[in-house]
Amino acid sequence: MLYWIYEWWAKANEAGAEWSHGLRFLNWFQYISVRAGLATMIAFLLSLIIGPRIIRKLISLKVGQPIRTAEEVHKLAELHGKKVGTPTMGGVMILGTVLVSVLLCGRLLNPFVTVVMFALLSLGLLGFMDDYTKVVKKSSDGVSGRTKLFWQLVVGAFVAIFLYTKPETSQWLFSDQNIAWADSERNIAHLSIPVSKSPFLYLGIFAIPFFVLVLMGSSNAVNLTDGLDGLAIGCTITVALAYTVLAYVAGNYNAHEYLSVPYNPFVGEVCIILMALVGASFGFLWFNAYPAKVFMGDTGSLAIGGCIGTTAICVRQELLLVIIGGIFVMEALSVMLQVASFKSTGKRIFRMSPIHHHFELGGWKETQVIIRFWILSILFALIGLATLKIL
């Protein structure tokens, strides 16, 4: 809406309307940095305003988080027993505030904005159905794993095909190509690698399944990380901030020339979504910090993971997500290694997976695990950003 107001003012100013001279501040709304900052503040303040109301409503509806029994998780049930009954589905707060902020500050017809918001909201709906099923059954078992993977596959396929086929999103300019952006080939199929200005590999049509894999992996990794108060949302903030920088430089031609990163003139608008997510995450953390008053549930975690994964594809930095999202990768890998080890040898590598539970059972207090993982997340983000300057 704000950009529409700027365009309306700009046309009037160009036509010489006298009233437009007194509203020159509306010129600010053309800048992504201004609208991104406003999106952050709107999402944060809106979260603080509606947060208590949403929590009270969830409590009145008895939407409590089911906790796995002692037979399932043994000692962990004692550590987390006090969390029984804490309202879940708090992800609706994140999705709602991000949506309002983007509607106000974003350019909705921008194809990158469209596809990232689609991933966020559609996977949020899937997570909501999973949380709702858990509440109704009063069990930690929600939507079946196969059903969840199927719908993630559907969402991922839509995102991948959209990005691959639409000219505005598929055409990119790499620093070693001396051609105009509009004349470039479908460069979205080129796989970028950190610290290299040249594409690493041309995937062709296989870019589509690769994009699906990135989105599904990111969505499930964030979901696995969401096991301690404030852990997943704190890491979300650092990852979203890092990708805001990447999105901004990818949409800025001068930064493209200096840093030798892939360039697309439309992708900078993704900064609005990411900064809205940062603001919403800070607002949610206000209530989700230890001891949590509300959990995001799969409503939030699946949506956030899908948003981050889609953004990584949009800015052509999928492989960098392994570094910047290092905590999410650690959590997902710990589960895969644990399952593989137990099925093949009958032995466990970790006391329990995901890995944050391993440290809990090792004697770390919950707050120690959370803060130390936040520290690692910040370091991973800084390391990832350090690769921006190509050798």
Image: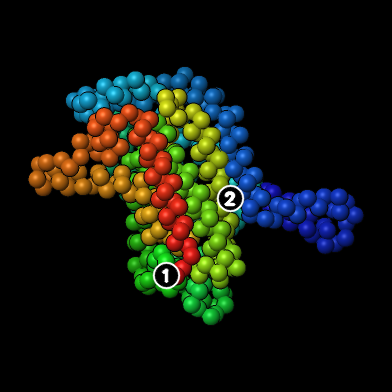
Q: Residue at x 34, y 56 (%)?
A: 213
Query: Mark 1 sits on what residue?
Result: 196
Image quarter for residue 126? top left
Query: Are there few (<14), some (14-19), or many (20+) residues within 10 Å of tag 2?
Result: many
Kind of residue at disc 2 = Ile
Question: Does residue 66 sit above or below 92 in this rendering?
Answer: above
In the rendered image, is residue 52 in sight? yes
Whole-percent x, y for residue 17 in the image? 88, 57
Question: Does residue 331 sit above or below 12 in this rendering?
Answer: above
Question: Does residue 161 sit above or below 175 in this rendering?
Answer: above
Q: Nearer the viewer, residue 122 or 26?
A: 26
The answer to which of marks 2 and 1 sits earlier in the sequence is: 1
Comparing labels 2 and 1, the label whose residue is closer to the camera: 1
Q: Determine whether the residue tagged by mark 1 lies in a helix, strand or loop.
A: loop
Q: Residue furthest right?
A: 18
Q: Residue furthest left?
A: 345
Query: Where, quadrant-wise, is the C terminus in this rendering?
Result: bottom left
Q: Nearer the viewer, residue 214 or 347?
A: 347
Q: Residue at x 47, y 19 (%)?
A: 60
Whole-percent x, y for residue 228 in the image? 36, 32
Q: Are marks 2 and 1 in contact (CB under 8 Å)?
A: no
Q: Determine whether the residue tagged by mark 2 lies in a helix, strand or loop.
A: helix
Query: Mark 2 sits on what residue?
Result: 272
Kind of residue at disc 1 = Ser
Q: Nearer the viewer, residue 228 or 54?
A: 228
In the rendered image, is residue 304 in sight? no
Q: CA distance from mark 2 to mark 1?
A: 27 Å
Q: Residue at x 22, y 36 (%)?
A: 352
**Left/right of residue 97 with respect to residue 68 in the rendered view:** right
Query: Are there few (<14), some (14-19), or many (20+) residues within 10 Å of tag 1?
Result: some
Whole-percent x, y for residue 34 in the image? 66, 50
